[in-house]
Image: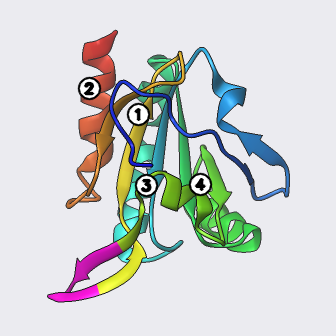
Amino acid sequence: MAIEEGKSAPAFTLKDPGGNAVSLKDFRGRNVIVYFYPKDDTPGCTKEACGFRDLWKDIQNTGTVVIGISPDDEASHRKFIDKFGLPFLLLSDPERKVMSKYSAYGEKMMYGKKTVGVIRSTVWVDPSGKVKKHWKKVAKAADHPAKILELLRSAE
């Protein structure tokens, strides 16, 4: 099932760094930015996470929740959060099941070669649980959070 704008976002439940189950439905009634990234504490992923961190107050002012999802385990997420002061949720998807549902895992080009892995992408889920926007491939991780904030503000 591919992600389609205007259709319901696939339900999921994953663990946060404390081992607690977090479900997409927990945030019904709010805008949710779900971003998928390959690995904690790597250059592009850190730039993207710190971009969301640096814009956190402005994002919160739009009433939006940010959730980062990677295959890393809870201990890795805790270290990443602590090292960079990340104020938003990071969830673990070690079996890449949620990533697959969201078209965030599969074949991609990396350094000119086809490979299989996490596809850096983002899905904006609206308050009713529908996909408002799907960024299928995020090319510039550092600039992406600001572009999202701009769209969130224009939707208010």
Amino acid type at circle 4 is: Gly
Measure the alpha-carbon separation of dots 1 and 3.
19 Å
| Front: mark 1 or 3 | 1
Marker disc for residue 85: 4
Cβ atoms under marks 2 and 1 closer than 8 Å? yes
Amino acid type at circle 3 is: Cys
Q: Which residues are magenta?
A: 107-114
Residue placed under numbered mark 1 in the picture: 124
Rendered position, 38 above or below 63: below
Rendered position, 8 above or below 47: above
- Give the mark nearer the N terminus: 1 vs 4: 4
Q: Dot 1: within a 10 Å radius of its alpha carbon, few (fewer than 14), some, or many (20 or more) residues? A: many
- Give the mark nearer the N terminus: 4 vs 3: 3
SS label for mark 3: helix
- Give the mark nearer the N terminus: 2 vs 3: 3
Residue placed under numbered mark 3 in the picture: 50
Q: Dot 4: within a 10 Å radius of its alpha carbon, few (fewer than 14), some, or many (20 or more) residues? A: few
Q: Which x, y percent locates residue 26?
A: 72, 28
SS label for mark 4: loop
Q: Dot 2: within a 10 Å radius of its alpha carbon, few (fewer than 14), some, or many (20 or more) residues? A: few
Measure the alpha-carbon separation of dots 1 and 4.
23 Å
